[in-house]
Structure formats: C-alpha cells, structure tokens
Amino acid sequence: MTNSPAPLHQLPDADFYGFEDLLSDTEKDKLAELRRFLAEEVLPHAVDWWNEARFPTDILPKLAQLELSTPVQQGYSPLFAGLVIAEMTRADTSLATFFMVHHDLFVEALHAFGSPEQKARLLDDARALRITGAFALTEPDHGSDVAGGMSTTAVRDGDTWVLNGAKRWIGNGTFCDYMVLWAREPETGRTRGFLLDATLPGVTRTRIENKTALRTVQNADIVLTDVRVPQADLLAGVESFDDTKQLLRGSRIMVGWQAVGAQLATFDVARAYAVERTQFGQPLAAFQLVQQQLVQILGNAVASTGMLARVTELEHGGYAVPSGEDAAGGDAAPAGAASGEDAAPAGGARGDMARAALAKSYASAKMRESVAMGRSILGGNGIVTDYRMAKIFADAEAIYTYEGTYEINTLIVGRDITGVSALR
Ligand SMILES: Cc1cc2nc3c(=O)[nH]c(=O)nc-3n(C[C@H](O)[C@H](O)[C@H](O)COP(=O)(O)OP(=O)(O)OC[C@H]3O[C@@H](n4cnc5c(N)ncnc54)[C@H](O)[C@@H]3O)c2cc1C
C-alpha cells in the first residue's frame, strides 16, 4: 500500500457528473477550441495582467475569432452558453467578466432593444469585438436600490437628450466605445436607455484604482455633465425599468456560472497542490482533513453546476413572461427596490427572477466556501498570486457582490416564497 497519489492526468476531471456529455459534438469541439485558446493565450498571462491591473486589449481579435458572442442566439444550447462562461472564469475571472459585460449586457441590450438602424450600425461590429461596450446602471449613491433611486437624468431637448449624473463601477468603462446607459426622465420618472458614445463631450471616465478583486477588469467612475445624446442613440425598444430587469436576469444567471467556474478553478489548483506538496513525509492529499475539503469543493461545484444548468434551460425555455406584463408600472419602483427589482405583484416574471436569484445566491455562497478551503489547502502560498489560488479567492468577492449582492438575491427569493417583501 502506498500513499503516493496517482499522476494528475489520470485523475477525474472536475466535471464529475459529466455535464459536458450533454453537449452536441459541435459544442464539445467548440468548448475544446475555447480551452485551447485559454490555455495558450490566457492562463500563462492572467496573473501578470491581474498584478499589473492591466486589461489585455491585444487578445480581443483572437477572442473574437472564437465567435462565441451570445451563443444561444447562434443556435447553441443554454448549457453550452453557461459552460463557456464557467470555462472562461476557470482560466481568468476577469476575462469572463469583460466578456459578460460586453456580450451578455451590451450586445444583448442592443439586440433586444435596439432599432433596426441601431442594430445595422453597431451589432456586427459589437459581436466581432471591433467595438467594445459597457453597461452603466449603478450609481455612486445607488447600488442595491438603483431601481427606485436612480438619479441620473435624461431631458429631451428637440432631437437630442441632455444627460446629467454619475455612474460607478462600470466594467470596461475606461476604454469602451459605447455604453448602454440608464437614466430617468425627471418629469415622468420613466427609465430610458441610451447607446452612449463614450467619447461625447461632457463624459468623464476615471479608472477605479486599488481594487483587491478583478484587477484586470477596468472599472470606471463615469460623470455626465450636460452630455447631448442624439435621439438616434436612444435605445428605441426600452419601455420601462422592467426592460433592465430582463437583461439582468440573464446576466445574473451567467454570474452564477462564474461561481461555477471559480469553483472548478479552485478544485484544479487545490487538488494539484495537495497531490504535489509534501508535509510530514506525505503528500497533503494523503491527509483525511485535506481530502474532506477537496471533496467538499467538488460537491459544491457539482451542485452549483446542476442548479445553473437547470435554471439556464428554464431561462431559455420560455418561462419568461413578456416584459411589463405582470409589473404594474415598472418605473414606479419604490426606493429600496433591488438591483433591477420593483414592487411588482406576484406573478411569472417575478418568479423567474427568483429562480435566477436563487441560483446566483446559492452558487456564490458555495463558491465563497470553496475558495476559502482552496486557499487554506495552499497554506501560505495561498496568499500570493503566483500560485493562482489567491487571485481566484480575491475575484470571488466580486462575483459575490455584483449582479445583485448575495443578500439582495436572497431577499428576492425570500419575497417570492413568502409573499412578503423584506426589501426596503
Ligand atoms: C467589480 C465590480 C464590477 C461591477 N460592474 C458593474 C457594471 O459593469 N455596471 C454596473 O452598473 N454596475 C456594476 N457593479 C455594481 C454592482 O452591481 C453593485 O456593487 C451591487 O449592485 C451592490 O451595490 P453597492 O456596491 O452600491 O452596495 P450597497 O447597495 O451599498 O450594499 C452594501 C451592503 O448592504 C447590503 N444591503 C443593501 N440593501 C440591503 C437590504 N435591503 N437588505 C439587506 N442587505 C442590504 C448589500 O447586500 C451589501 O452587503 C460592479 C461592482 C463590482 C464590485
């Protein structure tokens, strides 16, 4: 009997229940192509980008060549779309975040709410990453309560709109060409969406410095001072804040997939370390307490994957009620409404948001547990980015907070299952 662990290449993959077996052959090939790209172009550099807080714009043409923009619209399965985000996160959470902000928020918004002219002008370039986009909703004074509290204003003046206000945390905000920006008409309270040309006079973009998570992502503070936006850049299809919710529900699920990816990365790194590192004359993997943690990380990752796989299917399988149908005057959201939530009566669309919220909150809580164990398994080396685990650990905090914090998503579910809102 020996305590030497088997070579890593003989050990099972983190996809312990074979979710990837559910993909078509074309999808499996595409996922393999993505993995090659990540192994060659991303993994060798991701820690340096993170340490230097530098976004690698030079890899965007190669990323675009994978043609993975909004996969479901291209005919891929919802599971494949989720696994793409998980796999990107497994290599680098920041790259996945860039990708999601651009494709799942900016491109999706353009696709869903753009006029035929706007789509003809921008959609092909956006899908091919010839132009980059951001999504500007959060404000310095309104994060979780932005639905009811949004203070950025849009006032119509002839054939232009005049925008004033501030946005915070806007991913890709320092270098993007356009942002989908949300503002409120002061007189009516109606939410409007704009395809804001980020170079317009009156737009100031300042990089948020000294972050301890997602350092590669360029988040910006945006200030808008009498910015004149042509009527042609008003997002034509936006009726109310409910339309924002439709987008956020989809991207909330994709952030849940990021929590899956972070756990797969944790499993990769922690298991490899446990197998290779020796203490007391044994590999760490030979200690029962270490095995227990690795098994818990794996169990958390598999459970999160199962949950996300199902909710992604539901999201694309038609559980959505058309926007606004059950949301009495979506723009009349009370102060305290949460990250795209309002006080809509019980009904389908709210239940759909609750399902997305449960997947995101559950997976991100499990992720936090998993990354803490992974970091611990690496001992002191778990707090230097050289061994990857410290970066995975730190980035998990952003996943826990954005697209509705853990608490807000929990309260969305709580409201749904009790009929009583604690969101105030
Ligand atoms: C790295 C990163 C990237 C981001 N990218 C973008 C982006 O691209 N575009 C964009 O628009 N936004 C973006 N955000 C903003 C993000 O969505 C917000 O940070 C998030 O919604 C929380 O808002 P807040 O940070 O203002 O926290 P707050 O709303 O101030 O909340 C602080 C704490 O209070 C808790 N809390 C608040 N209200 C309640 C309540 N009613 N009950 C219980 N607890 C409550 C929260 O859960 C949290 O723990 C990003 C954020 C980060 C960190």
Image: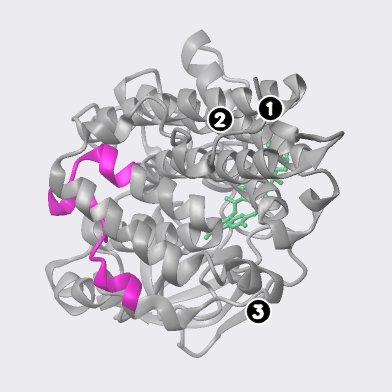
Sort mark 1 into few (<14), some (14-19) or many (20+) by Cα contacts within 10 Å: few
Q: Which residue is mark 3?
A: 206
Q: Is residue 4 above or below residue 265?
A: above
Q: Is residue 237 above or below residue 403?
A: below
x, y (%) of residue 161? 39, 75
The location of residue 45, given as percent across then percent down, is 56, 72
Residue placed under numbered mark 1 in the picture: 3
Residue 345 in picture, x, y percent from top left: 40, 21
Of the image marks 3 and 1, the number of the one nearer the N terminus: 1
Circle 2 SS class? helix
SS majority, magenta: helix
**Mark 2 highlights which residue?**
361
* Mark 2: amino acid: Ser
Q: Quadrant of residue 55?
A: bottom right
| Magenta residues (range) | 62-82
Amino acid type indicated by mark 1: Asn
Which amino acid lies under the numbered mark 3 shown in the image of this protein?
Thr
Kindly indicate whether the residue at mark 1 contacts the one at mark 2 (C-beta within 8 angstroms): no
Residue 320 in percent (x, y) is at 25, 31
Mark 3 and 1 residues: CB-CB less than 8 Å, in contact?
Answer: no
Marks 3 and 1, how far apart at CA: 54 Å
Cα distance in 3D space between marks 2 and 1:
38 Å
